[in-house]
Amino acid sequence: MRIGVAQIETRASDFGPTSERIVAYSEQAASQGVGLLVVPACALTGAVPVPYVERQGYMMDLAETVVDLADRVACPTVVPVATMVGEEVIPEAMLLSGGQALPLRFSAYAQAMAGGAQGDSVLSDTGTGMDAPTFELEGCRFAVAFTLDDLEDLCDYDFDIDGIVYLPIYGYAADDPASALGTALVEGGFVEDARQGGVWIVAAGSLGCYDTQVFTGGSFILTPEGDLAASAPSYEEALISAVVGPEGEAALSEPLEPEVYNQPFFCWEALALGIRGYARAVGKTDVALALDGTLGSMALATLASDALGPTHVHVLLANPLADVPAAKTNGAVRAGADGLTPWRRVLAAAARRDDCRRLAANLRVDMQERDPELVRATVVGYDAAHGDEERMRAARREAGIVATELADLAARTDALVLSPADKTYLALEADGRAAVTAALLPFGDLYRSDVLEMTRTRHTISPVVPHAGVALCDVPLLDHPELAGLSPEQRLRRIDLALASHIEWERTLSDLATTGESAFAEALIARFDACAPGRASAGVVLEASSRTLGEARRPYGTAWRDRVRDPRELEVPSDEEIEAAFRRYAQNAAAADTGTAGAKTPDGLASDDAGEPTEESQRNELSDLLGYLRDLAEGVGTGSMRAPGESIPDGEGHRGGHRPEGDFNPFGPFGASPFSEN
């Protein structure tokens, strides 16, 4: 049979227009002989439905839309929808054919609950604990997967299926190549999955910005041998199709050549798509931002120009005033041992004044000067300042005035305010004295070293950025002896590496301390916790990683802080030890109920009279049990299947990242080392 994928960009839950487009694509597909059309997961309902309080009306309109589509599609069509059970979002796939709408996932669940072991609508394996929805058309049997874990499991276990329809529900993440779909077939592991399972993989990639997630398309169809039968370009709408089944393998004499995945360039394009999509969602065509002399602001101006065109970008030249305070002391500005005092950072930004003007001219964006009256007021404030602390307060006041001017520029041009604040800033610099005032933070989920790599890659295409490097103003103020003596770029990469290890890869303080940098790790995490309130009001952040800062947030007011622990404290007990501990606790509980404490159990094991356990042994045993229960709870209801005793690969994130064991990249998503080759 011939199967097709309609890669379309839509507005979330815009039921009427989206339905018309799906019908039009089904008619086009039917004219090409397509026997099954697959629509991406976010096309109809988006990634996240409406709030719980509006669920009833939403679900009624969605049901009416699906029933109408079932009557109108020109060929059998799989249309995914985001449904709600309680307050939980559950992805579902509706098979529309002959005027009927079959919810595949619900049907599989219902049949499993009814005791059906295997049938037309469910794959069930009691040894794995997973029930996968399936359907059959023209003699081919397909299973449906919504996550990478589901896809892996269907490929790893011997199920009687011919192909897998993959409907990813998570957007692009720079540190997870699998999220790029067809652009990273080998890096994402899809070729290996197809060969491992001996099945066709039909992946339908969503396209556009849905809520805060960016979906880049990249739909594809792979043969059981891992050959590329059909591929849709990223960032563009497309209709692709291929013949699947035995006849399809015979017809595929010349498979397509997979793309070469360039992470920095791909991520740059994904963020550009996100800016366009978010601006359209809030009804804006223009954006406004401040060029403040930092690398991030220059990168953001370039990205905004690429996304919307230069005529839709308004920049305020707002780099800190140069020479005014330095002239007062004949240029003698005090510096610490590392030369990175806050005031030196301000002067470093001011030194990029000419670079900002050249960049605006190169991009041909709308360049706006600051209000001269407000500039003179700032000069007076600088003149009245004595010492670095007063000058820093004057610089912060100037930043507040600039934010007000930027807001006025955005109001005059009806523009969306953008901020260059990145993940490094939000993690370590977003304190109460340096608040972010913007509607959208395109770099908010990427570290500053990632922004640097993207800017350098963009620079190779068209050298518009005068200085694609790291200056003092681009380095977070994290004074620590272990950073002394490093160049600004080395300091930045060292900081970002530690942050990524703690946030994305969930390395504990003890894990970070194994590198011999315990004091640096403690200082970094303490600063990360201190900036939590500043992150709360930062603005909307485009998601671009496998774990956002919001997912790493600790509850406000929590007094407990982790400490560096002895490796012996972190030893994982064996399964036999855990089982024995559970047995002892169960026996003690039973003895307390029957009043037979201290009696021998049927298997000859004594409970309390075998020797009084020490306080330390009880504490360690209880800690192990709580850890075991935590791990057990995390695995309940995930639908992931693994062989007995097989652990989750290190670094597998909350999105179910497709990362083989040992694939941890210690230098961030773009793989750049913090040191030179020398």
Image (tube, grey):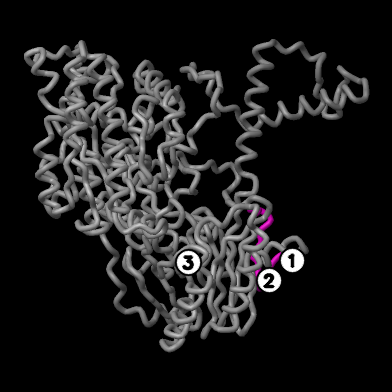
Disc 2 versus disc 1: distance between alpha carbons? Answer: 7 Å
State the quadrant of the C terminus: top left
Q: What predominant SS class does the magenta segment belong to?
A: loop
User: Which residue position is annotated with label 1?
Assistant: 116
Q: Residue 411: image x %, image y %?
A: 32, 48
Residue 449, magenta (yes or no): no
Question: 131 or 41: which is nearer to us?
Answer: 41
Foreground of the two, 635 or 239: 239
Q: Position of residue 470 (x, y in %)?
A: 18, 33
Q: Are marks 3 and 2 in contact (CB under 8 Å)?
A: no
Q: Which mark is residue 119?
A: 2
Which residue is found at the position 17% from the left and 13% from the top?
A: 335
Residue tagged 3? 43
The amino acid on which the numbered mark 3 sits, given as a three-letter code, is Ala
Where does residue 113 sit, x and y in percent of width and height? 75, 60
Q: Are marks 2 and 1 in contact (CB under 8 Å)?
A: yes
Relative placement, left or right, of 570 versus 359 is: right
Residue 322: give x, y in percent of width and height. 12, 27
In which quadrant of the rendered view does residue 237 lie?
bottom left
C-alpha separation, residue under disc 3 versus residue under disc 2 = 29 Å
Residue at the left extreme of this rendering: 330
Q: Which residues are magenta?
A: 117-129
